[in-house]
Amino acid sequence: MPEHPRRLILVDRRFQLQYLYIWLWVGVLMVLLAIGFYFAFARDLVGDRLRDPAIIRLLSGMSGFLVLFSLLMGLLSVVLSHRVAGAAWRLQQILTKLVEGDIEQHIVLRPNDYLQPVAAKLNDLQEKLRRSEQSIVSTLAKVEEFKLKLAREGHLSDADRVQFDELLHPLRVSFARRGEPVAEEK
């Protein structure tokens, strides 16, 4: 996918083109029904003029209009579906970064995009994760200070210090990967 796929109209081909296909089928079926209706019931209405060029032109014009209308509606639906598909693509990119540990991304969708409430809730979640992470880092530093204080005062044996370090090691590693400053093992 290109670097800026949101600039493309077809961000999610399968999702967006399904509406174009539906409208095209609707147009074709309407034309077929109109022609079928004409040949099935027109003999009673127009008699011997069944194949009159004026009637055929009228029927051809109506059929062309129906197909063109369906095609235009399909194209419009593709453009409008971009407001959903583009927003979904952006949210997926942010969620991927969030899973990788990058909670600093702020989700900004275009003003006319759908899924604005979802983006707002994800921003709230990211803010809550940031506060939780800051709280954990702060608590980790306090525990490290407390461990050092106990060691200085002689209340902490080498075995206790090792046990502290084993308990704190997963947190240190996790936050060190995220780039957060963490207290070092001593």
Image (cartoon, rainbow, N blue to C red):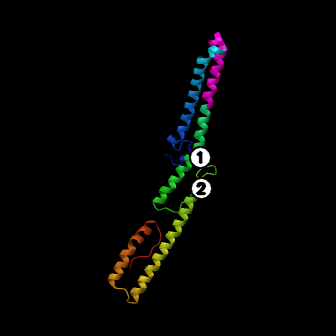
Three-letter code for the amino acid on which mark 1 is drawn: Arg
Q: Position of residue 167 (x, y in %)?
A: 38, 75
Give the residue at the far front of this rendering.
Answer: 44
Quarter location, residue 68: top right
Query: Quarter holding the C terminus?
Result: bottom left
Cα–Cα span, label 1 and label 2: 14 Å
Please report contact status of discs 1 and 2: CB closer than 8 Å, yes or no: no
Residue that label 2 marks: 117
SS state under label 1: helix
SS state under label 2: helix
Q: Work out whether mark 1 precedes mark 2 in sequence or the reverse, and give the earlier one.
A: 1
Direction from residue 79 to residue 178 in the image, left or right: left
Residue at point 46%, 59% (across, down): 99
Residue at point 39%, 77% (across, down): 185
Quarter location, residue 28: top right
Residue that label 1 marks: 83
Residues rendered magenta in the picture: 46-69
Q: Nearer the viewer, residue 115 or 172?
A: 115
Q: Position of residue 58 (x, y in %)?
A: 66, 19
Disc 2 packing (10 Å; few <14; some 14–19; many ≥20): few
Disc 1 packing (10 Å; few <14; some 14–19; many ≥20): many
Three-letter code for the amino acid on which mark 2 is drawn: Pro
Can residue 55 be found in the magenta stretch? yes
Above or below, 61 against 25 in this view is above
Above or below, 152 against 106 in this view is below
Q: Position of residue 114 (x, y in %)?
A: 60, 50
Main structural element of the magenta stretch: helix, strand or loop?
A: helix
Residue at point 61%, 24% (across, down): 63
